Protein backbone atom coordinates (compact mmCIF):
# COMPACT_ATOMS: atom_id res chain seq x y z
CA UNK A 1 0.00 0.00 0.00
CA UNK A 2 2.89 2.33 0.74
CA UNK A 3 4.27 1.80 -2.76
CA UNK A 4 0.91 2.66 -4.31
CA UNK A 5 0.70 5.82 -2.18
CA UNK A 6 4.19 6.82 -3.29
CA UNK A 7 3.12 6.37 -6.89
CA UNK A 8 0.33 8.94 -6.56
CA UNK A 9 2.31 11.31 -4.35
CA UNK A 10 5.25 11.65 -6.76
CA UNK A 11 5.32 14.79 -8.88
CA UNK A 12 7.66 17.06 -10.77
CA UNK A 13 8.24 19.33 -7.74
CA UNK A 14 9.47 16.91 -5.13
CA UNK A 15 8.96 18.01 -1.56
CA UNK A 16 6.74 20.92 -2.55
CA UNK A 17 3.12 21.23 -1.48
CA UNK A 18 0.80 21.96 -4.41
CA UNK A 19 -0.53 25.52 -4.24
CA UNK A 20 -3.41 27.19 -6.05
CA UNK A 21 -1.01 28.89 -8.47
CA UNK A 22 0.71 25.60 -9.24
CA UNK A 23 -2.65 24.01 -9.98
CA UNK A 24 -3.66 26.94 -12.19
CA UNK A 25 -0.35 26.67 -14.02
CA UNK A 26 -0.98 22.95 -14.57
CA UNK A 27 -4.47 23.63 -15.92
CA UNK A 28 -3.20 26.40 -18.20
CA UNK A 29 -0.41 24.22 -19.55
CA UNK A 30 -2.84 21.32 -20.10
CA UNK A 31 -5.16 23.68 -22.01
CA UNK A 32 -2.36 25.04 -24.22
CA UNK A 33 -0.96 21.58 -24.96
CA UNK A 34 -4.41 20.17 -25.72
CA UNK A 35 -4.93 23.04 -28.19
CA UNK A 36 -1.80 21.82 -29.97
CA UNK A 37 -3.17 18.25 -29.89
CA UNK A 38 -6.52 19.28 -31.37
CA UNK A 39 -4.79 21.38 -34.05
CA UNK A 40 -2.78 18.34 -35.11
CA UNK A 41 -6.02 16.32 -35.07
CA UNK A 42 -7.68 18.82 -37.42
CA UNK A 43 -4.69 18.82 -39.78
CA UNK A 44 -4.42 15.04 -39.94
CA UNK A 45 -8.16 14.33 -40.10
CA UNK A 46 -9.00 12.48 -43.33
CA UNK A 47 -12.76 11.91 -43.06
CA UNK A 48 -15.52 14.06 -44.47
CA UNK A 49 -16.05 16.22 -41.39
CA UNK A 50 -14.80 16.05 -37.82
CA UNK A 51 -16.96 16.83 -34.81
CA UNK A 52 -16.39 20.20 -33.13
CA UNK A 53 -17.76 18.70 -29.91
CA UNK A 54 -15.06 16.02 -30.04
CA UNK A 55 -12.35 18.68 -30.37
CA UNK A 56 -13.76 20.56 -27.38
CA UNK A 57 -13.98 17.32 -25.41
CA UNK A 58 -10.26 16.61 -25.80
CA UNK A 59 -9.41 20.07 -24.42
CA UNK A 60 -11.82 19.88 -21.49
CA UNK A 61 -10.80 16.34 -20.54
CA UNK A 62 -7.13 17.33 -20.50
CA UNK A 63 -7.81 20.28 -18.20
CA UNK A 64 -10.12 18.33 -15.88
CA UNK A 65 -7.73 15.40 -15.60
CA UNK A 66 -4.92 17.77 -14.58
CA UNK A 67 -7.10 18.90 -11.66
CA UNK A 68 -8.01 15.31 -10.80
CA UNK A 69 -4.32 14.43 -10.56
CA UNK A 70 -3.88 17.33 -8.12
CA UNK A 71 -6.73 15.95 -6.00
CA UNK A 72 -5.51 12.35 -5.91
CA UNK A 73 -1.86 13.26 -5.37
CA UNK A 74 -0.73 11.80 -2.06
CA UNK A 75 -4.01 9.98 -1.37
CA UNK A 76 -4.25 6.51 -2.89
CA UNK A 77 -7.73 5.94 -1.41
CA UNK A 78 -9.18 8.98 -3.15
CA UNK A 79 -7.40 7.97 -6.35
CA UNK A 80 -9.02 4.55 -6.46
CA UNK A 81 -12.39 6.07 -5.59
CA UNK A 82 -12.21 8.56 -8.45
CA UNK A 83 -11.01 5.95 -10.91
CA UNK A 84 -13.96 3.75 -9.91
CA UNK A 85 -16.32 6.65 -10.66
CA UNK A 86 -14.65 7.33 -14.01
CA UNK A 87 -15.06 3.67 -14.95
CA UNK A 88 -18.83 4.18 -14.82
CA UNK A 89 -18.75 7.09 -17.27
CA UNK A 90 -19.37 6.31 -20.91
CA UNK A 91 -19.51 8.53 -23.97
CA UNK A 92 -23.04 9.21 -25.14
CA UNK A 93 -22.02 8.40 -28.72
CA UNK A 94 -19.66 5.56 -29.54
CA UNK A 95 -16.22 6.46 -30.91
CA UNK A 96 -15.87 4.36 -34.06
CA UNK A 97 -12.52 5.65 -35.34
CA UNK A 98 -9.47 4.06 -33.68
CA UNK A 99 -7.46 7.24 -34.29
CA UNK A 100 -10.03 9.27 -32.32
CA UNK A 101 -9.51 6.95 -29.35
CA UNK A 102 -5.75 7.52 -29.63
CA UNK A 103 -6.28 11.30 -29.50
CA UNK A 104 -8.51 10.98 -26.43
CA UNK A 105 -5.84 8.93 -24.68
CA UNK A 106 -3.22 11.44 -25.84
CA UNK A 107 -5.11 14.32 -24.24
CA UNK A 108 -5.65 12.35 -21.03
CA UNK A 109 -1.94 11.51 -20.73
CA UNK A 110 -0.94 15.14 -21.24
CA UNK A 111 -3.46 16.25 -18.60
CA UNK A 112 -2.21 13.63 -16.14
CA UNK A 113 1.42 14.60 -16.69
CA UNK A 114 0.68 18.30 -16.27
CA UNK A 115 -1.39 17.53 -13.16
CA UNK A 116 1.62 15.83 -11.61
CA UNK A 117 3.63 19.00 -12.35
CA UNK A 118 5.89 17.17 -14.80
CA UNK A 119 5.78 20.22 -17.07
CA UNK A 120 8.88 19.47 -19.23
CA UNK A 121 7.68 15.89 -19.74
CA UNK A 122 4.17 17.07 -20.69
CA UNK A 123 5.61 19.46 -23.29
CA UNK A 124 8.00 16.82 -24.64
CA UNK A 125 5.17 14.27 -24.87
CA UNK A 126 2.94 16.68 -26.78
CA UNK A 127 5.60 17.75 -29.27
CA UNK A 128 6.98 14.27 -29.87
CA UNK A 129 3.63 12.48 -30.22
CA UNK A 130 2.23 15.29 -32.40
CA UNK A 131 5.24 14.96 -34.68
CA UNK A 132 4.68 11.19 -34.94
CA UNK A 133 1.00 11.68 -35.80
CA UNK A 134 1.89 14.27 -38.45
CA UNK A 135 4.62 12.13 -40.05
CA UNK A 136 2.28 9.11 -40.22
CA UNK A 137 -0.30 11.33 -41.90
CA UNK A 138 2.14 12.83 -44.43
CA UNK A 139 3.70 9.52 -45.53
CA UNK A 140 0.28 7.83 -45.51
CA UNK A 141 1.79 4.95 -43.55
CA UNK A 142 -0.13 1.67 -43.58
CA UNK A 143 -2.50 2.72 -46.35
CA UNK A 144 -4.75 -0.04 -47.62
CA UNK A 145 -8.00 -0.45 -49.51
CA UNK A 146 -11.37 -1.65 -48.34
CA UNK A 147 -13.22 -4.55 -49.88
CA UNK A 148 -14.99 -3.47 -53.06
CA UNK A 149 -17.97 -4.77 -55.00
CA UNK A 150 -17.36 -5.10 -58.73
CA UNK A 151 -20.37 -5.59 -61.02
CA UNK A 152 -19.74 -6.45 -64.66
CA UNK A 153 -22.34 -6.82 -67.39
CA UNK A 154 -21.41 -9.33 -70.12
CA UNK A 155 -23.22 -10.20 -73.37
CA UNK A 156 -24.76 -13.67 -73.25
CA UNK A 157 -22.56 -14.88 -76.13
CA UNK A 158 -19.37 -13.93 -74.17
CA UNK A 159 -20.49 -15.65 -70.99
CA UNK A 160 -17.62 -17.60 -69.40
CA UNK A 161 -16.94 -18.27 -65.71
CA UNK A 162 -13.24 -17.39 -65.94
CA UNK A 163 -13.59 -14.50 -68.36
CA UNK A 164 -11.98 -11.93 -66.02
CA UNK A 165 -9.72 -14.13 -63.89
CA UNK A 166 -6.47 -13.04 -65.53
CA UNK A 167 -7.31 -9.34 -65.07
CA UNK A 168 -8.38 -9.81 -61.46
CA UNK A 169 -5.29 -11.90 -60.67
CA UNK A 170 -3.11 -9.07 -61.95
CA UNK A 171 -4.98 -6.12 -60.42
CA UNK A 172 -6.28 -7.45 -57.10
CA UNK A 173 -4.95 -9.09 -53.97
CA UNK A 174 -8.18 -11.05 -53.53
CA UNK A 175 -11.35 -11.65 -55.52
CA UNK A 176 -14.35 -13.93 -55.21
CA UNK A 177 -17.37 -14.40 -57.45
CA UNK A 178 -20.41 -13.70 -55.30
CA UNK A 179 -23.35 -13.75 -57.69
CA UNK A 180 -24.30 -14.45 -61.31
CA UNK A 181 -27.67 -13.31 -62.66
CA UNK A 182 -29.35 -12.64 -65.98
CA UNK A 183 -30.50 -9.18 -66.95
CA UNK A 184 -32.03 -7.33 -69.90
CA UNK A 185 -34.52 -10.15 -70.62
CA UNK A 186 -31.80 -12.78 -70.46
CA UNK A 187 -29.59 -11.25 -73.13
CA UNK A 188 -27.01 -10.09 -70.60
CA UNK A 189 -25.21 -11.71 -67.66
CA UNK A 190 -24.37 -9.70 -64.53
CA UNK A 191 -21.35 -10.87 -62.52
CA UNK A 192 -20.85 -9.61 -58.97
CA UNK A 193 -17.35 -9.93 -57.47
CA UNK A 194 -15.98 -9.06 -54.03
CA UNK A 195 -12.45 -7.78 -54.59
CA UNK A 196 -9.61 -6.09 -52.74
CA UNK A 197 -7.45 -4.08 -55.11
CA UNK A 198 -3.67 -3.99 -54.86
CA UNK A 199 -2.27 -0.78 -53.37
CA UNK A 200 -0.85 0.40 -56.69
CA UNK A 201 -4.01 -0.43 -58.68
CA UNK A 202 -6.05 2.54 -59.82
CA UNK A 203 -9.79 2.00 -60.07
CA UNK A 204 -9.94 3.57 -63.52
CA UNK A 205 -7.26 1.24 -64.89
CA UNK A 206 -9.14 -1.79 -63.61
CA UNK A 207 -12.42 -0.61 -65.13
CA UNK A 208 -10.79 0.16 -68.47
CA UNK A 209 -9.30 -3.34 -68.80
CA UNK A 210 -12.63 -4.96 -67.96
CA UNK A 211 -14.49 -2.76 -70.48
CA UNK A 212 -12.19 -3.99 -73.23
CA UNK A 213 -13.12 -7.57 -72.30
CA UNK A 214 -16.91 -7.10 -71.87
CA UNK A 215 -17.59 -5.18 -75.11
CA UNK A 216 -17.68 -1.83 -73.28
CA UNK A 217 -20.88 -2.63 -71.38
CA UNK A 218 -21.71 -1.34 -67.91
CA UNK A 219 -19.11 -1.86 -65.14
CA UNK A 220 -19.53 -0.51 -61.60
CA UNK A 221 -17.21 -0.46 -58.59
CA UNK A 222 -18.41 0.40 -55.09
CA UNK A 223 -16.90 0.31 -51.62
CA UNK A 224 -18.41 -1.66 -48.75
CA UNK A 225 -16.97 0.76 -46.18
CA UNK A 226 -16.17 4.46 -46.18
CA UNK A 227 -12.44 5.05 -46.27
CA UNK A 228 -10.99 7.56 -43.78
Image (cartoon, rainbow, N blue to C red):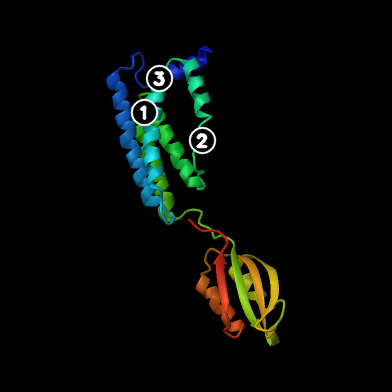
Which residue is found at the position 39% from the left and 33% from the top? 62
Residue 113, visible in the rendered structure? no
Graded by Cα atoms within 10 Å as few (under 14), some (14 to 19) or many (20 or more), the crowding at tag 3 reads some
Quadrant, the N terminus: top right
Position of residue 169 measured from the top left corner of the image (x, y, whole percent): 64, 70
Q: Relative to 5, is 56 above or below?
A: below
Q: Mark 3 points at which residue?
A: 71
Q: Relative to 65, is 154 above or below?
A: below
Kindly report the distance in space between the C-alpha atoms of the residues bearing marks 2 and 3. 22 Å
Badge 3 marks a residue whose secondary structure is helix
Graded by Cα atoms within 10 Å as few (under 14), some (14 to 19) or many (20 or more), the crowding at tag 2 reads few
Which residue is found at the position 58% from the left and 83% from the top? 217
Tell me whether circle 1 and circle 3 mark residues in contact (CB < 8 Å). Answer: no
Specify the farthest residue to the right: 161
Q: Relative to 50, is 174 above or below?
A: below
Which quadrant would residue 197 be assigned to in this image?
bottom right
Between circles 1 and 3, the one closer to the viewer is 3
Q: Name the residue under label 1.
A: 114
Q: Residue 90 carries which label?
A: 2
Kindly report the distance in space between the C-alpha atoms of the residues bearing marks 2 and 1. 24 Å
Describe residue 165's horizontal placement relative to residue 121 as left or right: right
Position of residue 112 measured from the top left corner of the image (x, y, whole percent): 41, 28
Q: Relative to 217, is 87 above or below?
A: above
Of labels 2 and 1, earlier in sequence is 2
Amino acid sequence: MAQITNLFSSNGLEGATPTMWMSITAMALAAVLSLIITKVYQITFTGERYSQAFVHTIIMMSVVVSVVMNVVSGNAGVAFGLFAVFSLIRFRSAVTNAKDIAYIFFGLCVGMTAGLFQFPLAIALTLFASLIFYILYKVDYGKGKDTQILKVTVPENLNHENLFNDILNEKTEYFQLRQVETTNLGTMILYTFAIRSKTDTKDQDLLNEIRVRNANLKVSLSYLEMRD
